[in-house]
Image (cartoon, rainbow, N blue to C red):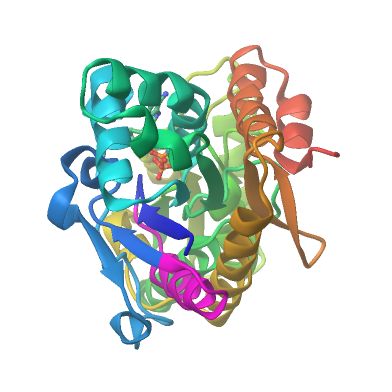
Amino acid sequence: KKRIAVMTSGGDAPGMCAAVRAVVRAGIYLGCEVYGCYEGYSGLVKGGEYLKKMDWEDVRGWLSLGGTLIGTARCMEFKEKWGRLQAAKNMILRGVDALIVCGGDGSLTGADIFRDEWPSLVAELVKNGTFTDEQVEPYKHLTIVGLVGSIDNDMSSTDNTIGAYSSLERICEMVDYIDATAASHSRAFVVEVMGRHCGWLALMAGTACGADSIFIPERPPSSKSWKDELKEICLRHRSKGRRKTTVIVAEGALDDELNPITSEQVKECLVEIGLDTRITTLGHVQRGGTAVAFDRLLATLQGVDAVKAVLESTPDTPSPMIGFVDNKVVRRPLIESVKLTKSVATAINEKRFDDAMKLRDTTFKE
Ligand code: ATP
């Protein structure tokens, strides 16, 4: 029986539990054994109890849950070769040679490095006497499949990451709450939202909530004029009878000189035009709560496809990342998708903002 390990890694996102559930159940349905790897890569490095066989019933009720019940962690040891050697040993001890990782670009990069290195790690485990040649014979090749779990929706090659729409929903609920009190007191609110270097959550939330203005890294305003422009926009809206002012700031917002645009700076502008202004930093509530229907579906469809991809993989096929493009589940070469994602950061650093926008939407074509 094929033994597959499934892990969640990096920042937690609603829908990760649904993805694990789908992998466990699709795996069992297709004749595999599935092991839950607890605490991300730390679980592989520690082994033993951290690699636990999961049965059909173990994931009952997981479809809608937020967070991840198999835990996630940032694991420095896995970035070192000795940590990966330990991980390889623990996997072979459990009879596992396929790994489905649900995480962000860092986690998927780590997974691909692990696969490339796998043959030399196995050779080293024979050389240092941990295993014999016969023992490692069935483990010559490591299969890696990536699922993108992230609230930021910051991965190229997929239209959506697991968790992004749940987070967007949460942000919109919060902004609606804030809007009610803002309109009552005729106040202004600056709402800072997550997304790291990606403006997707801020842009979507600002549009869905009818914000007066939105600041994101990919469409930076002029460093010279953004403050005056913001004041002019908000005053104009007020002059038309609007009783509230809402400005959404992505945590990674920049101006076109790459200076950060902070909530404090935005607040100062609004105070200067006479508005009673408060800052609300939404923080970790954006990660919380149940997964919205879309994330449950995405995680389920992709989790099932991840198991199929494991069963169809050969030593020659590149590790796939399961994505979702134009409403269809697709497989893309993992490392190409990671590279594209990283090139967005490079484009922003080089002030090629139009390229950054395009690269975000680019799908690697096979
Ligand atoms: P998020 O987007 O939510 O931050 P992420 O997967 O990008 O998720 P990271 O902290 O970058 O989060 O990576 C998670 C873990 O993946 C790291 O703690 C580390 O164990 C592993 N990892 C990341 N990069 C590498 C790498 N270059 N080599 C080996 N392992 C890595």
Observer-nearest of 278 and 361: 361
For the question of whether residue 252 can be seen, the reply is no
For the question of whether residue 319 can be seen, the reply is yes
For the magenta stretch, what is the residue range?
Answer: 12-33
Side (left or right) of 291 relative to 36: right
User: Where on the image, by quarter, is ligand 1?
Assistant: top left
Furthest residue in direction top, as rendered: 350
Observer-nearest of 131 and 76: 131
Observer-nearest of 160 and 204: 160
Q: x and y percent of residue 75 in the render? A: 24, 35
Residue at 62% x, 39% y is 319
Q: x and y percent of residue 320 in the render? A: 65, 44
Q: Main secondary structure of the magenta part?
A: helix
Residue at 60% x, 77% y is 297
Side (left or right) of 235 relative to 355: left
With respect to residue 59, does 88 lie above or below? above
Furthest residue in direction right, as rendered: 365
Furthest residue in direction front, as rendered: 134
Observer-nearest of 322 and 319: 319
Quick check: is 156 in the magenta stretch? no
Image mark count:
0
The quarter of the image holding the C terminus is top right
Which image quadrant for residue 336?
top right
Which image quadrant for residue 322?
bottom right
Side (left or right) of 157 relative to 102: right
Q: x and y percent of residue 22 in the render? A: 50, 74
With respect to residue 364, does 209 lie above or below? below
Q: x and y percent of residue 8 in the render? A: 37, 54
Residue at 34% x, 51% y is 95
Quick check: is 19 in the magenta stretch? yes
